[in-house]
Each structure stands twice: as structure tokens, then as C-alpha cells.
Image: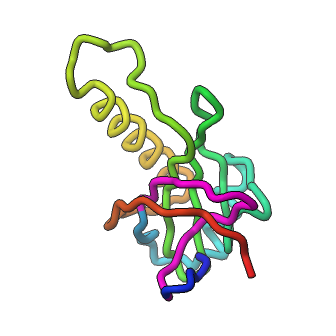
Amino acid sequence: MFLKADGSEVWLQSSTRLPYLSLAGVIESSEDYVAIRPRLRRVYEQLSGIASDDAFLVQELEDGGALVFCARPDKNCALLLLGKFHRGRERRKPCAVLENLVEMIRNSLDGIGRQAGATIRFEVVQPELAMRAR
């Protein structure tokens, strides 16, 4: 995470001001992150220079968006939604975009947990603004 001027933390580093949605939580496992990290690296592309610690590309979205999983050695983690998320094929349901987003997050969370051999528990959803590292 990066510290903002007000003392709060953000996960993503960017050369431009980039809003994103963060689902933050913890990796629940008796193993240290040192044991979990190689399993994530085998499955997901590791992105360098965009987060304070590890960042893994979980899924690319239409129109250049992405889901990125970030994790720290203390096992705090976040799933970041970058860019736009479209409602997909279901246009009849008023809440289709939210239902599709929740399904995508659930599927991604299940996959990350399986690969990590741990339970990923998200506790906070909040919008953030990416900023440069100091």
C-alpha cells in the first residue's frame, strides 16, 4: 500500500490519477506469505511497479480494464477493479451489471483462494485514487 497525504493507504501506483475500486481484506492461512506467493506466481502474471508489494493480473476486462490481486507479506490483500465493468449480455434485468460484477468477483476470489491454498476474506469495499510512489 502507499500512504496518501492524509495518512490513509492505497494499493495502486500510477503515473496518472487513476480511480479504481478496491476490495481489501486478508489471506487466511497458517502458512506464511513466502509459501503462498510462488503458487500465485505460477498461475497469474506478476505485474511489477504498479503496487507497493505484489500485484497479479487475474483477468483482463473489455475496454482495457482489469482485475488485479495485490498482496503484502503480512497477508493483507486487495482485489482491484481497474477501468469500466460492463453489464454484459443480460440487458433485461435492471441489476444485471451488479449481478455480473458480483459473479466475476466471486469466481475470481474462488480461483485465487484455490491457487493460494488459502481463504481470501474481503472486509472493505472502497473507491481509491492511484498515485505515484514517493
In this rendering, the answer to whether 64 lies above or below 11 is above
Residue 104: x and y in percent read: 42, 36
In this rendering, the answer to whether 121 lies above or below 113 is below
User: Could you tell me which quadrant the N terminus lies in?
Assistant: bottom right
User: In the image, is 18 to the left or to the right of 28?
Assistant: right
Outermost residue toward the left?
94
Magenta stretch contains residue 29: no
Magenta stretch contains residue 17: yes
In this rendering, the answer to whether 132 lies above or below 99 is below
Please name whichever residue, 45 or 94, is drawn nearer the observer in this view of the structure: 94
Q: Please report the residue visible at 47 percent of the width from the left and 82 percent of the height from the top.
A: 8
Q: Quadrant of residue 21?
A: bottom left
Q: Please report the residue visible at 66 percent of the width from the left and 54 percent of the height from the top.
A: 56
Residue 67: x and y in percent read: 56, 45
| Magenta-tinted stretch | 7-23
Please name whichever residue, 10 or 32, is drawn nearer the observer in this view of the structure: 10
Residue 132: x and y in percent read: 71, 71
Q: Please report the residue visible at 68 percent of the width from the left and 65 percent of the height from the top.
A: 13
Q: Please report the residue visible at 54 percent of the width from the left and 82 percent of the height from the top.
A: 74
Residue 113: x and y in percent read: 47, 54
User: In the image, is 48 to the left or to the right of 22?
Assistant: right
User: Could you tell me which quadrant the C terminus lies in?
Assistant: bottom right
Q: How is the image coloured?
A: rainbow
Outermost residue toward the right?
48
